Each structure stands twice: as C-alpha cells, then as structure tokens.
Amino acid sequence: MSRILVGPFNRVEGDLEITLDIADGRVDSAKVNSTMYRGFEQILQGKNPLDALVYTPRICGICSVSQSVACAYALADAMQMGMPRNGELCTNLILANENMADLLTHFYLFFMPDFARPVYAAQPWYETVERRYRAASGEAAREMLPARAEFLHLMGLLAGKWPHSLSIQPGGSAKPVEAHDRLKMLAILAGFRRFLERRLFGDTLETISQLNSVAELSQWAAQKPWQSSDLRTFLHLSLQLQLDQLGATTVPFMSYGNYPLEGERLFRPGVIDAQGTRTPLDSNQITEDLSHAWLTGQDRPQHPEQGVTQPSLENQQGYSWCKAPRLDGQVMETGALARQLNNGHPLMMDLAARSGANVHNRILARLLELAIVVPQMERWARQIDPSERFCLHSAMPDSAVGVGMVEAARGSLGHWIGVEKGRISNYQIIAPTTWNFSPRDSQGVPGALEQALQGTPLPDGEKDPVSVQHIVRSFDPCMVCTVH
C-alpha cells in the first residue's frame, strides 16, 4: 500500500486536496479535503434577515446568482410570499444565464484542456486536440470567451451587474424589463444559440436535445468527422479513452428541481437510481454529519434547520472542513446528470441504465442541458409582459423559518434560515459540492467523489494522474461554495 497527495488542483474554483491510498496499481480509498474554511454562516448570525441578500452571493464569484436565488427563496418562504409571473420569468432567466455560462466555462476551460496534456502526446488525435483545447491559449477558448461575454450581457439587462447582483428579491425582480430590453435579450440569446450550434454542437439545439438513445447519439456522431464540432470531439475522445468506465458511482441521484413558473418546474425534483426507480424528494430527511469534519457543536447528524457550523481542529477523525450531508442516511450525487435523470430524459436514462454515473455521462448531461435550456430562455424572454408587475413586497415576521432550494450548475443548493426577534438566529447552507465532495459519515461511508475514485487505475510513479483529474472535473467542483 502506498499513498499520494494530489493537489492543490488548478482549474477548479477554490482549494482542494485529495489523499489516495494505492494498492495493486489502483486507488484503494480516497479522502477529499476541502481545505479552506470561510465562516459565512457565522457572519450571518444576528444580521437583519434581508442582509442575507447582500452576504450570500459573495460566497462565490462564479455562481453568485444561485446563492442569491436560494437566499431569496428562503426569505420568501419565511415571509410566506410568492412572485408574480414576471418575477419568476426574470429570476429563471438570470439563474439560467449564470448556469449556462458555468456549464460552458467548465467544458471549455476546466475539462477539455486535460486532453491537451503531454501524457496523451502519443495519441493520434493529440495534435488536433492540443491545438484546440490547450489551457489559456487554445483555439476553443479564443472562440468561446467572446461568446460567453456577449451572453452575459443578458445579466446586465436583467440584473444590473454580475456577480453579486441585488436585483433578485424574495418577491421577484427589482429591475423591470422594458419592451426594448426584451428585444435586446432575444438578440443576445440568438447570438449565443449561433455559437452553440456552429461550434459546440455542429447542429441545431433542438436536434441535440431530442436525441433519445445511445444508438441515436452514435448515429448522429457518425454523420460528420469527429473534428467537426466540440461535442463530436468529446464523444470521440471519450470512446478512445473509455471515459464511460471511469469515475463510476452507484449512489442515487438527487435534484431539488429548477426554474419554477406558476407551480410547474422545467426540471422536476426527486431522487432516482441508475435503474430508473424514482422517489419523491423529502427535504425533511436531509441531515449533516460532522463525524469526519473539523467542526463541532453536533453529537449526531442534524437537519440543517437545527444545524451548527462551528470550526474546531479537535476532531481526531476530521480530514476536511466539509460536512457530510445525507438524504435519509444515504450518499447522493447531484448535478446535471441527476437533473436529467430525474426529469426522465430518454438519452440520459439509456446511458445510466447501461453504465450508471461516470465521467462520460456527467459531461454529456452538462452539454445536453445547454441544448435544452437555451431555447427555453428564448421562450421565457418572449413571455415577459412589461406592463405587469415584476416584484411584490412583504414584511418579515419577528420569528420565522424558511428554506430555499435551487439547482445551481453543479447541482442542488439549499439555504435554511431561522429568524428570532427580527434577526437571523441560524443560517445553514448545503452547496452542490458539499454533497458530491463530502467526507465519510459516522458509518464510515465515503462521499460521492471518494467512491468515484475507488478502483481508478494508476500507473506506477504517476504523481498527478490524469485519470483522477478527469474524474474530479467531471463533477465540476466549486470549493469556495463547499465550506461557506
């Protein structure tokens, strides 16, 4: 048995270290360490509840809108209020704008550059891939970044600025949209669609979103050379490197559901396993376990409403600042794959039935979501009625509790707030990477990434194994959100 420490990782948001125990050329066990404690939940203690709208977006600079929306939903729940239709439309558009930008950034800047590493130099595809995807200076980044920047102009029209917008409120959007703004939004979305269809997919968004099986996907990919679009390139590399056999987990998939509009959601909430057995999501069954975290204040797993976030280095079993969230005592995987499985997308259901969760399926689900959501954004933009209200107002009770649950790009994000005497008495947050990168719980069960790393083959002497990089990045970690 040997041990290596992988990290710190580049091209991830925040700080991450992973300890791998190696036996017989494979990972025998893994321990994932979120290395940076930040203390946002303590900062919020005693503040005016509405101040959370200012503090929580600053948990992260790349998914601040997700934090804003979860916070606004939690405050709205505490105030027992809803949003007008325009408020829901604008909130969905703002959240989708950030989520789609994150999915695009992850693919081009975080994930694909690993295939341009010299370790792959002997591969027949390497020269083409290295030229297009090498970190910082590849052709793909030079094409994607202007398209992403133009797409994020939508945020200026809807939210005033990004990150850390204050336009998202418990009662809707504080920034109304005029008729001419709506036309600008549609032009921005049309430009983003052109980039996706020309470079990422090499086909229409509707064609991609309606692929219903592995057989259809294979037939589609074979219609043109693998170099003709970035999705076809990924599929080619995945086939050559067998990414569908890398980073497997067998845990259930959880989604809080996303993009509500008048009681319906574009992506529905739920829990599903790889065989397709789906159960409703009961958020009352969520607990956080501190047994292997550098935290104190709880002698047993607690629901976030009663949770405590108090740092301590006295825990001899601790190896991460991250808590271990569980649903009904079970490890969950969350993210785009979980969303599409819970939503019953036929292609992802077929893939999961064949091979469960793995690097290939996680990345494909992210790209599929771009093809699904961008046309929906176009429909939302057309439905905004500038003559109607965008935001409602209400008062916060002196005592209240509330929960806000949303899907960020990386998965399920929840905010729980308690208010006493008009001040925040407790505020707890479970981020997507808290679920996926959790340490072991009191039963010794590893988190989703720790399980995904087990069994990974490692060549002798390799200190920065590219296979580990692929697995970690397939979850798209955001470590600054993980330990708030």
Image (tube, rainbow, N blue to C red):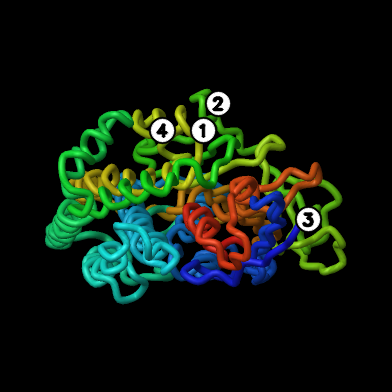
| Identity, as a three-letter code, of the amino acid under mark 1 | Gly
The picture places residue 451, in percent across and down from the top left corner, at 64, 45
**Observer-nearest of 123 and 321:** 123
- Badge nearest the viewer, 4 or 2: 4
Task: Kindly report which numbered mark, 4 or 1, lies closer to the viewer in this rendering.
Answer: 4
The front one of 449 and 481 is: 449
Mark 4 in CB contact with mark 1 (< 8 angstroms): no
**Is residue 460 visible in this depiction of the protein?**
yes
Q: Does the image show residue 158?
A: no
Answer with left or right where residue 384 lies relative to residue 174.
Answer: left
Q: Which mark is residue 351?
A: 4
Mark toward the start of the polypeptide (4 vs 1): 1
User: At 83% from the left edge and 47% from the top edge, which residue is drawn?
Assistant: 300
Amino acid found under the numbered disc labelled 2: Thr
Q: Quadrant of residue 129?
A: bottom left
Q: Which residue is mark 1?
A: 270
Contact check, label 1 and label 3, Cβ < 8 Å:
no
- Which part of the image, by quadrant, shows the N terminus? bottom right
Mark 4 vs mark 3, foreground winner is 4
Gap between marks 4 and 3 measured at Cα = 34 Å
Q: Are marks 2 and 1 in contact (CB under 8 Å)?
A: yes
Mark 4 and 3 residues: CB-CB less than 8 Å, in contact? no
Instruction: Please name the residue that numbered disc 3 is placed on.
Output: 292
Q: Decide which of tag 4 and tag 3 comes sooner along the chain.
A: 3
Residue at left offset 58%, top offset 51%: 457
Quarter placement of the C terminus: bottom right
Disc 4 secondary structure class: helix
